[in-house]
C-alpha cells in the first residue's frame, strides 16, 4: 500500500547509504558513538527521528515491522511511526515480537527473548552517558578515547550516598565488550540484562544529537556497579494483574480516585500472549466481566 | 654497608623535577622566560612575585595545563625520568591523576560543585579503579578528618561549605592518591587571615607527615616563610633571585626582592 510518491522507506538511497556506513562502523566498534548526518524527518525531535532513520536504512520490502512505545504497540508514538512506514515502505507490520524481523522501540526491550536475524532499533534522546557529568563534547570524546570512566562511578557513588542504594533506574550505563561505556537509552534498568549477549542486532539512533551506535549480537554489555553494591534489575514487587506474570516489567495504573491501583505488564504483546495461553492475574476476571 | 649507602645517596641525588630553560610567550609578550631549577624529593619550593610576574604561567606550564614554547620539564616518574612536555596526552593525564596534583586558587575550579564532599574526595580513587563503595567512603572519611572537616558533612555538596572548608576539601581531593608532587596556586588566596592561618597549619602538617614535594605559587611572603624550604623570586617573567627561604627573606640581594620584603606591613 506504499504511496508511489515516496522512495522506499522515505529516505533517498544516498542518505540510506550514509546511514548504513555509520551503522557498519558502529557494529565494527561496539558501543562507540558514530557521528552521522542526521536528516530532517517529518516528525519533531524527541519523537524518534534517530530511530526512524536507522529503521529506514535497515528496512527491506520483505521485513515485518513492529514498533513499541513504552512496551505498547498502540500508543501515539508507536502508532504514528508504524503508519509512517506502512505508508512510505509498504512493509508488513505486526504486534507480535516473535514474528517481527525489525523492531523499533522506545524505552523498552521486549520480554520475549529475541532471536538471530532480528534487529532491535532504539530511539535515543541523549547518547552520551557522560553528558550530565561533563558538559564539553570535546572533553567527553577524549574521555571515551582514553577510557577515563571514573566519573561514571562518581555518579553511582552519589546515588548510594544520597539514597542508600544505586537509585538510577533507567538509562543505566553499561560497559560494552570491556571498552566503551554506553547509554542504553532510557530503558528501565530491569531490561539491562537483556542487552547482554542478546542474539539480536541492537542499533541505537539519536537524531537530534546525530549519533548512531550498536551492540552486535552476543556482545557483552555489563552494567556498572560497586563490589559491595552490585547491580540489581528492579521492578515493582507484584505480579501482573491481568496475566499473572511474575517476571515481567510492570506499569502501575491508577484505577480510581480512592488510591486504587493495578499493576500490568508494560510489554502489551507479552501480556496478551500469556492471556491467550490461559494465564490470568488477580483482576483478569473483573476485566472480562 | 657502603653499597647500601651509595644506593641511598643515588636515590636522593636525582631531583624529582628538573626544569631547564622553560619559556612561555604570549605572542610578543613574555609569560615566563628561561626558568631553570631542580626540585628535590620532600622539598617545598615557593615562587613569589607581584601580579603579572609570570608565576602562575610558570606553574601552569609545569603542570601541563599550558603548552610551553621551549625548555624541558623532567619529572622522575616511577618508571624513570620523563620530559613532561614530550609525554603523550594519555600518559600525561594518567600522571595527572596519580603522581601529580594541582590545587587551584579558587576551589570551585578544582571541585565538582554538584557532587558531595565524599564523591569529590573519592573521584580519583574511582578513576584508577576503586570499585568498593565502603572502602572509597572510608578513605573519604579519613581524608575529611585529616583536613579537619566534620565527618557529618561527607554527603553535603561543596556549595554548602564555607570558602576555607572548600579549599580544605580541594586539598583532600588532591592528596587522596598520595601524589609525589603537588602544585599549589595561591592556596590561601581569598581567605581571611584566621582561616589562612589554620589552612597553613594544616598544610604544614600534611607536608611534613606525607613528605610531600610541592611547588607553591603565592604573593604572600608569610605563606612561603611557613611552608617553603626554598624560594624563587620572579619579576617580568624572569627569576631574579633564588635560595633558601630564610636567606632570601632575611638578606635579600636583588633590588626587587628588597622592595618586596620591605613592602610587607608589620602589625
Image: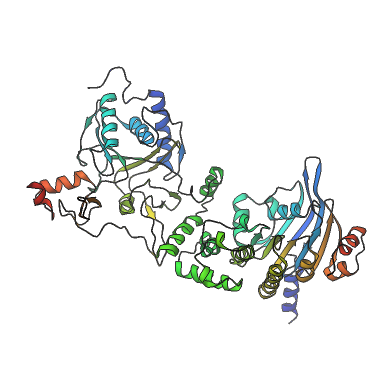
Q: Position of residue A152 (x, y in %)?
A: 47, 55
x 52%, y 53%: residue: A148
Q: Quadrant of the N terminus of chain B?
A: bottom right
Residue B39 can be seen in this image: no
B261 relative to B17 in the view: left or right: right
A66 relative to B184 in the view: left or right: left
Q: Position of residue B118 (x, y in %)?
A: 52, 65
Outermost residue, top direction? Answer: A5
Residue A60 found in image quarter: top left
Outermost residue, left direction? Answer: A289
Near-viewer residue (A53 or A30): A53
Vertical placement of A242 versus A161: above or below?
Answer: above
Residue A259 found in image quarter: bottom left
Outermost residue, bottom direction? Answer: B1
Residue B113 can be seen in this image: yes
Q: Quadrant of the C terminus of chain B?
A: bottom right
Vertical placement of B146 versus B231: above or below?
Answer: below
A237 relative to A286 in the view: left or right: right
Vertical placement of A263 versus B1: above or below?
Answer: above
Q: Position of residue B93 (x, y in %)?
A: 60, 54
- For the image, the number of numbered tags is 0
Near-viewer residue (A231 or B2): A231
Near-viewer residue (A103 or A199): A103
x 20%, y 44%: residue: A268
Render colour scheme? rainbow
Q: Position of residue A147 (x, y in %)?
A: 51, 52
B171 relative to A205 in the view: left or right: right
Amino acid at each position: 500500500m506504499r504511496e508511489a510518491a515516496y522512495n522506499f522507506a522515505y529516505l533517498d538511497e544516498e542518505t540510506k547509504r550514509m546511514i548504513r556506513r555509520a551503522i557498519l562502523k558502529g557494529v565494527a566498534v561496539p558501543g562507540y558513538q558514530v557521528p552521522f548526518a542526521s536528516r530532517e524527518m517529518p516528525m519533531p525531535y524527541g519523537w524518534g527521528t534517530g530511530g526512524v532513520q536507522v529503521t529506514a536504512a535497515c528496512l527491506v520490502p520483505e521485513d515485518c515491522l513492529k514498533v513499541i512505545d513504552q512496551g505498547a504497540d498502540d500508543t501515539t508514538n508507536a502508532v504514528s511511526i508504524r503508519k509512517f512506514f506502512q505508508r512510505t515502505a509498504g512493509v508488513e507490520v505486526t504486534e507480535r515480537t516473535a514474528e517481527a524481523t525489525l523492531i523499533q522501540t522506545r524505552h523498552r526491550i521486549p520480554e520475549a527473548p529475541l532471536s538471530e536475524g532480528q534487529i532491535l532499533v532504539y530511539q535515543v534522546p541523549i547518547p552520551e552517558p557522560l553528558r550530565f557529568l561533563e558538559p564539553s563534547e570535546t572533553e567527553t570524546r577524549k574521555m571515551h578515547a582514553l577510557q577515563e570512566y571514573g566519573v561514571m562511578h562518581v555518579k553511582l557513588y552519589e546515588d548510594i550516598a544520597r539514597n542508600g542504594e544505586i537509585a538510577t533506574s533507567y538509562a543505566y550505563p553499561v560497559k560494552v565488550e570491556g571498552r566503551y561505556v554506553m547509554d542504553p537509552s532510557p530503558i528501565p534498568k530491569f531490561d539491562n540484562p537483556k542487552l547482554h549477549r542478546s542474539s539480536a542486532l541492537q542499533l541505537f539512533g539519536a537524531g537530534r544529537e546525530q549519533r548512531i551506535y550498536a551492540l552486535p549480537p552476543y556482545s557483552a554489555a555489563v552494567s556498572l556497579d560497586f563490589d559491595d553494591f552490585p547491580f540489581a534489575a528492579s521492578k515493582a514487587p507484584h505480579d501482573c494483574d491481568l496475566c499473572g506474570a511474575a517476571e515481567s516489567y510492570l506499569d502501575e495504573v491508577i484505577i480510581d480516585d480512592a488510591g486504587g491501583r493495578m499493576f500490568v505488564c508494560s510489554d502489551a504483546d507479552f501480556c496478551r500472549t500469556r492471556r491467550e495461553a490461559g494465564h490470568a492475574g488477580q483482576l483478569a476476571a473483573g476485566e472480562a466481566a | 654497608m657502603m653499597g647500601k649507602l651509595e644506593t641511598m645517596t643515588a636515590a636522593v641525588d636525582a631531583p624529582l623535577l628538573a626544569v631547564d630553560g622553560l619559556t612561555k610567550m604570549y605572542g610578543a609578550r613574555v609569560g615566563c622566560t628561561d626558568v631553570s631549577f631542580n626540585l628535590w624529593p620532600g622539598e617545598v619550593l615557593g615562587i613569589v612575585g607581584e601580579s603579572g610576574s609570570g608565576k602562575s604561567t610558570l606553574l601552569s606550564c609545569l603542570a601541563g595545563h599550558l603548552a610551553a614554547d621551549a625548555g624541558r620539564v623532567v619529572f622522575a616518574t616511577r618508571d624513570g625520568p620523563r620530559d613532561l612536555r614530550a609525554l603523550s596526552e594519555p600518559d600525561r593525564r594518567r600522571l595527572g591523576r596519580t603522581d601529580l596534583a594541582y590545587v587551584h586558587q579558587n576551589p570551585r575550579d578544582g571541585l565538582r560543585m554538584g557532587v558531595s564532599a565524599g564523591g569529590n574526595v573519592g573521584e580519583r580513587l574511582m578513576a584508577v579503579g576503586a570499585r568498593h563503595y565502603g572502602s572509597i567512603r572510608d578513605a573519604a572519611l579519613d581524608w575529611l578528618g585529616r583536613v579537619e572537616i566534620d565527618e557529618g558533612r561527607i554527603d553535603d555538596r561543596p556549595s554548602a561549605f564555607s570558602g576555607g572548608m572548600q579549599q580544605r576539601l580541594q586539598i583532600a581531593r588532591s592528596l587522596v592518591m598520595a601524589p609525589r608532587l603537588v602544585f599549589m596556586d595561591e592556596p590561601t588566596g581569598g581567605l581571611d587571615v584566621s582561616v589562612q592561618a589554620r589552612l597553613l597549619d594544616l598544610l604544614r602538617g600534611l607536608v611534613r607527615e606525607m613528605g610531600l614535594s610541592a611547588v607553591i605559587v603565592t604573593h604572600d611572603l608569610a605563606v612561603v616563610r611557613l611552608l617553603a624550604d626554598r624560594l624563587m623570586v620572579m619579576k617580568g617573567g624572569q627569576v631574579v633571585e633564588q635560595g633558601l627561604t630564610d636567606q632570601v627573606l632575611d638578606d635579600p640581594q636583588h633590588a626587587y626582592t628588597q622592595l618586596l620584603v620591605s613592602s610587607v606591613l608589620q602589625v
